[in-house]
Image (cartoon, rainbow, N blue to C red):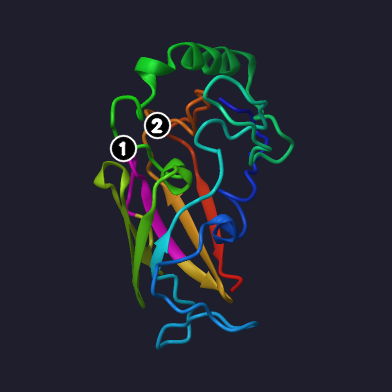
């Protein structure tokens, strides 16, 4: 649908997502300069309560202010998605019918990556081989299984299948097996069931 070009979405979907997330859980002592909290095995500890502070859920592309829509610089490298003409027509149709077609309007699961930058807090519980994310929105959950392969597909899950590994202090999450029913945002930007998403999470303090 989007051609062969790789869609790179910075900040919220690319490197260092946690740079743009809100300060972690109340009562959690901030680390001293140059340090980050760590698990017993030495890996960064992402446990806590987080919230993305962006307008990506409205539109991942840069956009001007409008009625009930604050302006945003967007999170897409190059500002525009590389839609083919027929895909662009579908995005425009999605936008025109967003009040009834958007999964958020139906209170369905929003999928990944959208759940990560919706304007609601979520909690991370972490062990050495598993991260569990508990979201306020729709009581959604997301499991990231560490150092394990994806199951055989094709499978179309609302939240996809997430498998993680560490590259130094960066958590890299590989996501496949998604449904084509979810959108990236309220503007109707969409993907197919063939989407393959790679997220990178890095604590900076």
**How would you rate the neighbour count of disc 2 (Cα within 10 Å): few for under 14, some for 14-19, many for 20 or more?**
many
| Along the viewing direction, whichever of 36 and 151 lies nearer the viewer | 36
Residue 99 sits above or below residue 177 on the image: above
In the picture of the structure, the residue carrying the numbered disc 1 is 109
Q: Is residue 80 left or right of residue 104?
A: right
Q: Which of pointers 2 and 1 lies earlier in the amino acid sequence?
A: 1
- The verdict on residue 107 being magenta is no
Q: Is residue 5 left or right of residue 103?
A: right
Measured in 3D between alpha carbons, the distance from the residue under mark 2 to the one under mark 1, in whole angstroms, is: 8 Å
Quarter location, residue 138 = top left
In the displayed image of the protein, which residue is found farthest to the right? 78
Q: Position of residue 15 (x, y in %)?
A: 62, 57
Tell me the chief SS of the magenta region.
loop
Figure quadrant of the C terminus? bottom right
**How would you rate the neighbour count of disc 1 (Cα within 10 Å): few for under 14, some for 14-19, many for 20 or more?**
many
| Along the viewing direction, whichever of 149 and 104 lies nearer the viewer | 104
| Along the viewing direction, whichever of 30 and 170 lies nearer the viewer | 30
Q: Is residue 185 left or right of residue 84?
A: left
Mark 2 and mark 1 in contact? Answer it, CB < 8 Å.
yes
Q: Position of residue 124 (x, y in %)?
A: 36, 64
Q: Residue at x 71, y 33 (%)?
A: 79
- The verdict on residue 157 being magenta is yes
Q: Of the numbered discs in the image, which one, if any, rests on residue 182?
A: 2
Q: Residue at x 65, y 82 (%)?
A: 34
Label 2: which secondary element: loop
Residue 100 sits above or below residue 128 on the image: above
Label 1: which secondary element: loop
What span is colored magenta in the figure? 151-164
Q: Position of residue 177 (x, y in %)?
A: 37, 43
Q: Is residue 62 left or right of residue 161?
A: right
């Amino acid at each position: 649908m989007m051609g062969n070009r790789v869609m790179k979405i910075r900040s919220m979907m690319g490197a260092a997502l946690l740079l743009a997330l809100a300060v972690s859980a109340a009562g959690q002592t901030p680390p001293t300069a140059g340090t980050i909290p760590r698990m017993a095995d030495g890996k960064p500890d992402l446990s806590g309560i987080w919230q993305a502070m962006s307008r990506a859920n409205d539109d991942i592309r840069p956009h001007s202010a409008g009625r009930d829509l604050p302006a945003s610089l967007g999170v897409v490298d190059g500002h525009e998605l590389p839609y083919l003409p027929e895909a662009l027509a579908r995005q425009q149709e999605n936008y025109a019918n967003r009040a009834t077609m958007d999964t958020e309007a139906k209170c369905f699961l929003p999928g990944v990556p959208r759940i990560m930058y919706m304007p609601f807090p979520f909690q991370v519980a972490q062990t050495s081989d598993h991260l569990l994310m508990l979201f306020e929105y729709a009581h959604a959950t997301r499991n990231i299984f560490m150092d394990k392969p994806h199951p055989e597909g094709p499978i179309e899950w609302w939240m996809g299948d997430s498998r993680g590994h560490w590259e130094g202090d960066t958590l890299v999450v590989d996501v496949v097996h998604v449904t084509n029913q979810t959108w990236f945002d309220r503007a109707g930007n969409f993907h197919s069931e063939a989407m393959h998403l790679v997220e990178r999470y890095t604590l900076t303090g």
